[in-house]
Image (cartoon, rainbow, N blue to C red):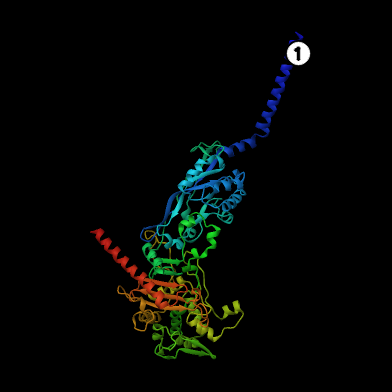
């Protein structure tokens, strides 16, 4: 009996001890560590997935899609679940076509975020890569696939620089923009960046259950807490540009393999019809992200919009402004002739005309038509830099035009500018060089096009537009920045017509059988004429700026061929092609509308 009692006591004691141990452990897990383990459990089972909103589409002026979305698969990762960035990079590099070192850098940076928000580490993977990822899912903890939206450019390189591209927000952008989170996509350049707030839309938010390997167990679950609510995705707004997609493509192709820019604008409204910059880039290369190696190969692509951000000496196209200043200041009598022997001396310094044998007697009209340098050398000394500078400003040269795109000012030099930047006085020879668009002055092709459109439309300097106005909400009104004297403008219009249609005119290669063209050539020196070199980078820049029809202008076209040589021979035929395409398209569309209405 005593034996049984002893055994009962031992069993009871063991039971009590087990109960105490169990209770203590239960207290430790549920009470002391309860909140920590509850959060841990939630982080590993309940996942907040952002549903990327499709960006808004971009249309040209005629309703043609020039940028829209196509479905793509992206690889995302939860930063807090990256246990070993090195190991994960090695495994992923065997599956997807991204260098291991590049993946390692991305994953290290992502892991350092320690964020609950997933981050995209690879975009637009191929079907084969997708299948391999699914096959190796269990070895890739924290990784999951997202059905995203890839931007598609129907025109390829033709409008890529203008439209820009999107990319993953960096730390600075996350800090700057309130609605942006790590891993979000936003516009990085061009139209994509300028109108990003409207194009971006609002990402959705969905809570899902996943297993230990990050695989989704159910598509959607009811949130266990009141604060866990799904958010509807809102697609970005569509944007309509003033660009004519067909004209843009022709202009891009017309430049061929040359570096340069073309700007075409409606001279009455200020709407940009084409804006080309070459070299461009292949959008499919951007969609996966620019690798450091590709960034180094600058010759293979360019992100620079030369139309608004490239600054160049204007050469003889600036004679339009110089001639206007001479007329306004009454420095030049249009009837007065100047003899051009092929050079002009200023304080013993010889300044050559582009025509070595000289032009002979030149009045202002002939000096524009035949682009005589000596005429402008001599008359500029009477005008002076103080007489010329205000007109550079009046035409907006060396100033931003106000277009809704990133642009550079360039340089519109003056006595004060030189004293401030170079700590030197202004010399008479510098005025002569400025008068023919050489020396310190630099401009953008867009500025020259705005200048040309002002002559074409009778004197209104317009603020260029890249976004199409909704005519149902707002009238299609041009925004005039300056108004020029009508008499001086009328004189210049006659001279620019003569430059293309007269026998000795420098713009004869722009003559068209479809419409009348007016314009001015320019050949801007890159290095001194004393430097002899056959290298392309030392060749002159070729300019031609024009409008058509001459008597009732609709379109202005400016062409810059960087290091192209002669403006007359190289740039003028390109402008002609763009102008003729504009009128051909106008005719075809008009005929199509008539046929449709019948």
Along the line of sight, which residue is nearer the eye, 399 or 527?
527
Quadrant housing the N terminus: top right
Q: Seen in the image, is 496 located left or right of residue 109?
A: left
Q: Position of residue 464 (x, y in %)?
A: 43, 68
Asked whether residue 457 appears in the rendered view, the answer is no
Asked whether residue 436 appears in the rendered view, the answer is yes
Q: Position of residue 541 (x, y in %)?
A: 47, 75
Dividing the picture into quadrants, the one containing residue 428 is: bottom right
At a point 44% along the width and 72% down the height, the residue shown is 560
Dividing the picture into quadrants, the one containing residue 356 is: bottom left
Q: Residues within 10 Å of mark 1 (few under 14, many from 20)?
A: few
Along the line of sight, which residue is nearer the eye, 60 or 75?
75
At a point 49% along the width and 47% down the height, the residue shown is 129
Dividing the picture into quadrants, the one containing residue 519 is: bottom left
In the image, is residue 244 above or below residue 437? above
Pick out the residue farthest to the right: 2
Along the line of sight, which residue is nearer the eye, 60 or 390?
60
Identify residue for label 1.
6
In the image, is residue 54 above or below residue 450? above
Q: Position of residue 569 (x, y in %)?
A: 40, 77
Pick out the residue farthest to the left: 598
């Amino acid at each position: 009996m005593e034996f049984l009692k002893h055994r009962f006591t031992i069993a009871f004691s063991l039971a009590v001890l087990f109960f105490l141990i169990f209770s203590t452990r239960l207290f430790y897990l549920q009470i002391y560590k309860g909140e920590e383990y509850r959060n841990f459990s939630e982080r590993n089972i309940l996942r907040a997935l952002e549903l990327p909103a499709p960006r808004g589409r971009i249309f040209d002026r005629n309703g043609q899609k020039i940028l829209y979305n196509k479905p793509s698969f992206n690889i995302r990762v939860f930063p807090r679940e990256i246990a070993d960035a090195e190991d994960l990079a090695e495994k992923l590099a065997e599956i997807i076509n991204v260098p291991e070192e590049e993946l390692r850098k991305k994953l290290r940076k992502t892991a350092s975020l320690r964020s609950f928000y997933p981050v995209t580490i690879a975009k637009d993977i191929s079907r084969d890569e997708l299948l391999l990822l699914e096959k190796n899912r269990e070895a890739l903890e924290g990784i999951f696939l997202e059905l995203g939206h890839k931007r598609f450019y129907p025109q390829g390189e033709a409008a890529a620089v203008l439209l820009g591209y999107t990319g993953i927000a960096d730390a600075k952008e996350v800090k700057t923009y309130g609605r942006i989170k790590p891993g979000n996509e936003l516009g990085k350049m061009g139209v994509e960046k300028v109108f990003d707030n409207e194009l971006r839309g609002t990402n959705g938010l969905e809570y899902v259950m996943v297993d230990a390997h990050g695989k989704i167990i159910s598509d959607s679950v009811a949130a266990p807490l009141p604060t866990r609510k799904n958010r509807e995705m809102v697609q970005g707004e569509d944007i309509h540009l003033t660009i004519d997609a067909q004209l843009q493509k022709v202009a891009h192709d017309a430049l061929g393999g040359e570096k340069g820019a073309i700007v075409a604008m409606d001279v009455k409204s200020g709407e940009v019809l084409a804006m080309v910059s070459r070299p461009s880039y292949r959008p499919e290369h951007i969609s996966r992200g620019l690798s450091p190696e590709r960034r180094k190969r600058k010759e293979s692509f360019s992100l620079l919009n030369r139309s608004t951000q490239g600054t160049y000496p204007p050469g003889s196209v600036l004679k339009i402004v110089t001639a206007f200043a001479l007329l306004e200041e009454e420095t030049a009598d249009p009837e007065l002739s100047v003899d051009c022997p092929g050079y002009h001396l200023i304080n013993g310094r010889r300044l050559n005309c582009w025509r070595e044998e000289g032009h002979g007697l030149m009045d202002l009209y002939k000096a524009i038509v035949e682009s005589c340098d000596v005429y402008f050398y001599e008359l500029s000394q009477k005008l002076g830099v103080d007489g010329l500078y205000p007109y550079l400003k009046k035409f907006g040269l060396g100033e931003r035009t106000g277009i809704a795109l990133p642009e550079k000012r360039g340089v519109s030099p003056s006595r004060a500018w030189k004293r401030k930047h170079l700590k030197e006085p202004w010399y008479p020879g510098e005025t002569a060089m400025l008068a023919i668009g050489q020396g310190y002055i630099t401009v953008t092709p867009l500025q020259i096009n705005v200048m040309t459109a002002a002559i074409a439309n009778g004197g209104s300097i317009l603020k260029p537009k890249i976004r199409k106005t909704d005519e149902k909400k707002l009238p299609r009104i041009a925004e005039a920045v300056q108004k020029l004297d009508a008499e001086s403008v009328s004189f210049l219009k006659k001279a620019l017509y003569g430059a293309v249609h007269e026998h000795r005119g420098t713009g004869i290669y722009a003559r068209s059988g479809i419409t009348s063209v007016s314009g001015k050539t320019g050949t801007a020196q890159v290095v001194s004429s004393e430097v002899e070199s056959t290298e392309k980078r030392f060749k002159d820049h070729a300019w031609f700026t024009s409008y058509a029809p001459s008597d009732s202008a609709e379109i202005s076209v400016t062409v810059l061929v960087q290091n192209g040589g002669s403006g007359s021979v190289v740039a003028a035929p390109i402008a002609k092609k763009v102008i003729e395409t504009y009128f051909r398209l106008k005719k075809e569309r008009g005929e199509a509308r008539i046929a449709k209405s019948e």
